[in-house]
Image: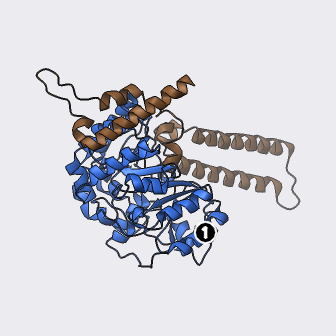
Chain colours: A brown, B blue
């Protein structure tokens, strides 16, 4: 429970208790006595003011009230959502998409040594030649498929 | 007491305890220091009878086949046939060692919706060391290439440890070169055999934050989709600005939960948790979802997080790791416990 929640609950309890006490005093007067009109009007005023104050506190709490908690509500991005099975998020259309086929072509291209600096490490030195060949074959097949789709 | 856990669409099925790798980070519950109760593995008929009942009762739409190593089950093609015939989505988690072109053809590259294989490093010595077996890197990468040639959807898994974190950027390049459809970034989460290697494998929050920043930047440049598969407490690693990573909190007990069926037919809240909710051969899925053990698991929060306003959504990280390492789901996630002094106020 946050400080703001604790303050809200505490203040609500005190207000409700006070209002109930005043209400009981006005509505259940001593035997033979009748509440006067001014007393009823004062009671109505207190009820409206009390409820207004309480609703205000609820509003401040829900709004992440800075002066109650001493800090603002965390931005939406830092609130953890429930984790989905990754196949529902990773493979659904979204921001992560957009692989440029040229990026993959560049990564799978034979290394070209830069003068004086040698060859930049890449898939050609990480993968076995057989796997590299298969990755290149798959890229070619993908390009051919894409070209076929374009022509169709 | 809170409402019973709702029905789910996904379930993980651990087909066998057997494995031909011995990963340093393996979280399989039967490798925990505290003994996991043994039970004979279900045979083909018993497993299919159980799955048929659960799929019908629970309305499952997706099954993740895991292990151990699922390809060590001789009846795997038959199980995939059975699931595909019922139009269930299938994810297959494998180390790729037995996934030859012939095995892919037998299983059907496209009948399995997602193939999930480890891609732990670009340096084969590091990948093999983490996998506990020589040749693991070459076999996994060749299986990925064969799967892509066969038109499959393939996701790589990068377990973030101190041993391989410096290679993350290059691993993302390699994943792109292999044509993978995405990469999962799972922080090392102690459990099983992994709990014996915390000092060797556990990265600090600062190291993880730096790695996530690199991943964010490289993901944009390469167009490689990423997902984060293990909850990361936001008080230790600030997710602000990491818009391409899909952070999330524990889903156990929610409609997105991935309850896990062990090889003997017992149901657990997730694949990391050693808590046995009950025997699915004897009780219904709904009854086990409503079991007191499940309610307790859902409600568990570490005392360390009591004053945090995100405690209910974050839940303090991974409760299953807390169970394994500290004996209770209400204990702090071991990552949170190790770096408690570094927490930000949220």
Q: Position of residue B203 (x, y in %)?
A: 27, 49
Q: Residue at x 53, y 46 (%)?
A: A88
The residue indicated by pointer 1 is B285
* Residue B229 in view (yes/no): yes
**Viewer-proximal residue among A72 and B321:** B321
Depth check, front residue: B335 or A49: B335
Q: Using residue A97 as the reference point, say whether residue A40 is left or right of it.
A: right
- For disc 1, the chain is B
Residue B241 visible at all: no
- The quadrant the N terminus of chain B occupies is bottom right
Nearer to the camera, B194 or A128? A128
The residue at the far top in this view is A115
Work out whether residue A113 or residue A1 is closer to the camera in this orientation and state it: A113
Which residue is situated farthest in the left direction here?
A116
Indicate whether B295 appears above or below B343.
below
Up-down relation of residue A43 to residue B33 (above or below): above
Q: Residue at x 60, y 62 (%)?
A: B5
């Amino acid at each position: 429970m946050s400080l703001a929640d604790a303050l809200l609950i505490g203040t609500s309890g005190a207000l409700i208790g006070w209002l109930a006490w005043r209400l009981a005093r006005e509505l259940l007067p001593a035997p033979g006595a009748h509440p006067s009109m001014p007393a009823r009007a004062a009671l109505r005023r207190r009820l409206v003011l009390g409820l207004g104050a309480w609703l205000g506190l609820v509003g401040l709490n829900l709004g992440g009230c800075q002066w109650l908690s001493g800090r603002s509500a965390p931005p939406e991005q830092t609130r953890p959502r429930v984790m989905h099975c990754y196949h529902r998020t990773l493979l659904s259309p979204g921001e992560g998409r957009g692989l440029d086929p040229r990026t993959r072509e560049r990564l799978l291209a034979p290394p070209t040594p830069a003068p004086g600096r040698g060859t930049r490490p890449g898939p050609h030195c990480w993968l076995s030649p057989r796997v590299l060949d298969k990755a290149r074959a798959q890229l070619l097949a993908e390009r051919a498929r894409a070209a076929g789709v374009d022509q169709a | 007491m809170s409402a019973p856990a709702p029905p789910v669409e996904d379930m993980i099925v651990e087909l066998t305890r057997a494995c031909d790798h011995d990963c340093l980070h393996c979280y399989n519950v039967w490798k925990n220091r505290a003994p996991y109760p043994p039970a004979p593995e279900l045979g083909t008929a018993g497993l299919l009878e159980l799955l048929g009942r659960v799929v019908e009762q629970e309305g499952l739409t997706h099954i993740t086949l895991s292990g151990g190593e699922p390809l060590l089950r001789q009846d795997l093609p038959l199980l995939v046939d059975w699931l595909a015939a019922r139009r269930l989505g299938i994810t297959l988690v494998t180390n790729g060692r037995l996934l030859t072109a012939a095995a892919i053809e037998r299983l059907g590259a496209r009948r399995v919706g997602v193939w999930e294989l480890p891609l732990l490093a670009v340096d084969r010595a590091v990948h093999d060391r983490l996998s506990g077996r020589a040749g693991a890197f070459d076999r996994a990468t060749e299986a990925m290439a064969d799967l892509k040639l066969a038109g499959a959807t393939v996701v790589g898994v990068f377990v973030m440890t101190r041993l391989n974190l410096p290679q993350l950027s290059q691993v993302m390049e390699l994943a792109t070169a292999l044509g993978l459809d995405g990469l999962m970034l799972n922080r090392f989460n102690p459990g099983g055999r992994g709990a014996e290697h915390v000092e060797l494998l556990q990265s600090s929050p600062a190291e993880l934050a730096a790695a996530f920043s690199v991943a964010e930047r490289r993901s944009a440049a390469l167009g490689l989709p990423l997902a984060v598969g293990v909850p990361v407490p936001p008080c230790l690693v600030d997710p602000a600005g990491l818009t391409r990573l899909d952070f999330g909190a524990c889903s156990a007990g929610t409609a997105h939960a991935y309850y896990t069926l062990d090889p003997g037919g017992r149901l657990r809240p997730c694949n990391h948790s050693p808590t046995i909710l009950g025997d699915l051969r004897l009780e219904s899925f709904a009854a086990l979802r409503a079991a007191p053990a499940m309610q307790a698991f859902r409600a568990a929060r570490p005392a360390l997080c009591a004053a945090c306003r995100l405690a209910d959504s974050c839940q303090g990280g991974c409760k299953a790791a807390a169970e394994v390492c500290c004996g209770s789901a209400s204990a702090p996630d071991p990552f949170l416990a190790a770096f408690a002094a570094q927490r930000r106020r949220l």
